Image (tube, rainbow, N blue to C red):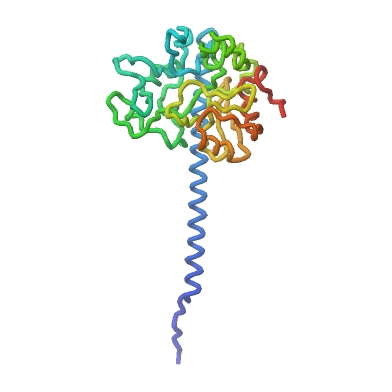
Amino acid sequence: MSIKRAKRGFTLVELLVVIAIIAILIALVTVAAGMMLDRAKSTKDMGNQRTIGQATFSHATDHNGKLLHPRTGPEAPPAEDSSQSQIDRMWIAAYGQDINGNNRLVNQGSGYIEMKSALEEGAAFQYIGSIMAYQSPMDPTIGDVSEFEAGGNFTNERIRSYSLNAFVGVEWGADDRTVYRDNPPLRLLQNGYWQATETLSQIPQPSETMCSIGEQDSWGRNGHGWLISPTSPMWSDFPAFWDNRRVNMSFVDGSTGAITLDSDDLKERWLQYGHDNYNPDNVVEYKKFKRVLLPGVIGSILED
């Protein structure tokens, strides 16, 4: 006589173990997928900045060596004034009216917003060719491009993620601020800022000199060039902190690279102060960025 044996199912303990294993596997896959997505965004960000760096180099090739200017609009006359040469080279045209008669910079009360035409009619656009190249996929503050057309409804205040190095492409000094040029006491006080880099030949080390960098300006749009003091740990601007402790950038020769931060101190300073913070307690991070401002003139890769 044959005996039929009952089929044995999972015990409660075994079932719980299986569920736990599945949950762990799902968590691991989720983490891995998130890391892959973050890396893909960082790669795209680096690609955008490579495009900007190559645009700067190409502009110099087409304009007798003259680089794109880091300002996003001219200074206001008569107290301050930008030359026509500077205006023609400004990579962003966030001033005046576009070809359709609409303002390229709109006052929203809480701040100014750059319109799409400010990018399209800037000196860099013919070399960059796409608004998307101005926007980092890691930047959480960027709005949809369609918002920045004339008559658009703004849900975000920023169309652009990147800034140019304030020390590159200038006729006589950082961002070509004429208030300092025309005031000898102020100019002497800020002596290290004044270096002429209008042309590629005035950049001693193009492959080591920062061209573009991500910036999340606490005032909204990234107005003018990205700036830190060349002589002391004074952060007029901060880099964007989108990629953990990694800060991507392009260089004047069109190549790209990154600076890795040692801690979150700089980010905490940005959150607390936003702009113009003197930080003598953390010169390590300061020196990393100083070295790429204008090596051979400001800073050096050989510095400690």
Q: Position of residue 97 (x, y in %)?
A: 33, 15
The quarter of the image holding the N terminus is bottom left
Q: Is residue 155 visible?
A: yes
Q: Residue at x 50, y 74 (%)?
A: 13
**In the image: residue 190, left or right of residue 71:** right
Q: Residue at x 42, y 9 (%)?
A: 77
Q: Residue furthest front?
A: 185
Q: Report x, y in % for residue 289.
A: 61, 28
Residue at figure coordinates x 49%, y 48% from the top left: 33
Q: Is residue 60 visible?
A: no
- Nearer-the-camera pick, 239 or 184: 184
| Towards the viewer: 33 or 230 | 230
Residue 54: x and y in percent read 52, 21
**How many discs mark residues in the rendered view?**
0
Decide: is 16 above or below 203. below
Residue 4 drawn above or below residue 230: below
Q: Residue furthest bottom?
A: 1
Query: Which image quarter holds the C terminus?
Result: top right
Q: Quick one: 201 or 297, which is closer to the camera?
A: 297
Percent of width and height locating residue 168: 56, 17
* Outermost residue to the left: 151
Which of the pair 201/179 is nearer the observer?
Answer: 179
Give residue 169's quadrant in the image: top right
